[in-house]
Image (cartoon, rainbow, N blue to C red):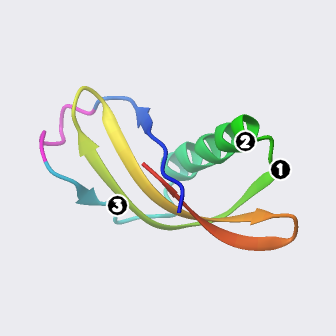
């Protein structure tokens, strides 16, 4: 499994500290972060990847929001799992 790092905007309402599960994997912001991570990973590895779905996710508040995501992505017609974070 391949792991990358992704960060987004800080939310003051969230407590700083440990990893918290993402309750709504269909949230548009979560999908946007996932799509960006898949696009960047594909660009860097010169692969044509397409996001299928967010399988699992966690967030952690540090100086921004850190994401750990398990994604189902399509590569050359096959769906594979990609671990980002």
What residue lies at 26% left-to-right and 33% top-to-bottom?
Answer: 11
Question: What residue did someone put label 3 on?
Answer: 22
The question of residue 7 being in magenta is answered with no
Q: Position of residue 6 (x, y in %)?
A: 46, 38
Q: Position of residue 58 (x, y in %)?
A: 33, 57
Quarter residue 2 falls in: bottom right
Give whichever of 7, 10 is nearer the camera.
7
SS of the residue under disc 1 = loop
Classify 79 as above or below 9: below
What residue lies at 21% left-to-right and 33% top-to-bottom?
Answer: 62
Q: How far apart are the two marked residues, 2 and 1, measured between alpha carbons? A: 9 Å
Q: Are marks 2 and 3 in contact (CB under 8 Å)?
A: no
What residue lies at 76% left-to-right and 65% top-to-bottom?
Answer: 74
Question: What residue did someone put label 2 on?
Answer: 45
Give whichever of 67, 31 is nearer the camera.
67
Q: How far apart are the two marked residues, 1 and 3, measured between alpha carbons? A: 27 Å
How dense is the environment of label 2, judged by Cα within 10 Å: few (below 14), some, or many (20 and up)?
few
What residue lies at 34% left-to-right and 61% top-to-bottom?
Answer: 22
Q: Which residues are magenta?
A: 11-17
Q: Position of residue 37 (x, y in %)?
A: 59, 43
Query: Which labelled disc corresponds to residue 48?
Result: 1
């Amino acid at each position: 499994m391949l792991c990358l790092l992704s960060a987004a905007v800080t939310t003051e309402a969230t407590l700083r500290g440990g990893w918290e599960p993402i309750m709504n994997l269909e949230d548009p912001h979560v999908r946007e972060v996932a799509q960006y991570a898949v696009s960047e990973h594909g660009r860097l590895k010169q692969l044509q990847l397409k996001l299928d779905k967010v399988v699992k996710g966690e967030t952690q508040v540090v100086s921004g929001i850190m994401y750990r995501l398990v994604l189902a992505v399509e590569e050359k017609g096959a769906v594979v799992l990609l671990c980002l974070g």
